[in-house]
Amino acid sequence: MKDQYFGDVNDYRKYGLLRLLGSVTRLPVGICWLLTAADGRSDGEFRRYLHEPVRWRQYDPQLYDCLQGLLAPGINRSVKHARTWELIPGATYYEQLLQDDIHSRRSYFEGAWTR
């Protein structure tokens, strides 16, 4: 996951599914992003759905409306919005940046498990 991809149509689908599973099962939801640094690429721009409310909003209106906040001027794409906007109610988040070296990865997963 990269901040540059946050809020694309695949996120809308994933968050919608997690919201549904969390509400139906009443089990706690944990989010471990596997967040890596931005790479400057321009892919991940699959946000056209945010301009098509008739087609997409019906599936989860509250989630759709929140994600449309990404269209506001000055809003940066960041996975931290999922937590601050409460996209997945009651979820626990692990938002650390995942590094490539083995020591950092071990530490990362230990921290995620503890969280």
Image (cartoon, rainbow, N blue to C red):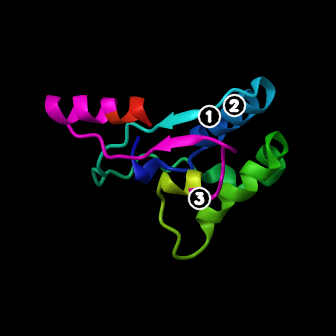
Q: Do residues under tags 1 and 2 come within 8 Å of each other at their CB atoms?
A: yes
- Relative to 45, 67 lies left or right: right
**20 sits left or right of 105 in the view:** right
Image quarter (top left, top right, bottom left or bottom right) of the C terminus? top left
The label on residue 86 is none
Q: Is residue 66 magenta?
A: no
Magenta part of the protein: which range?
A: 84-110
Instruction: Report crowding for label 2: few under 14, some 14 to 19, many 20 or more residues within 10 A (C-alpha).
Output: some
Q: Nearer the viewer, residue 46 or 69?
A: 69
Quarter the N terminus occupies: top left
- The residue that appears at 44% across and 39% down in the rendered structure is 33
Amino acid at circle 3: Thr
Secondary element at image label 3: helix
Image vertical order of residue 22 relative to residue 8, above or below:
above
Q: Residue at x 46, y 48 (%)?
A: 5
Q: Pointer 3: what residue?
A: 84
- Kind of residue sitting beneath label 1: Lys
83 to the left or right of 97: right
Mark 1–mark 3 Cα distance, whole angstroms, equals 17 Å
| Amino acid type at image mark 2 | Leu
- Please report contact status of discs 1 and 3: CB closer than 8 Å, yes or no: no
Marks 3, 2: nearer the viewer: 3
In this rendered view, identify the residue nearer to me: 99 or 74.
99
Image point 38% across, 52% down: which residue?
A: 42
> What residue did someone put label 1 on?
14
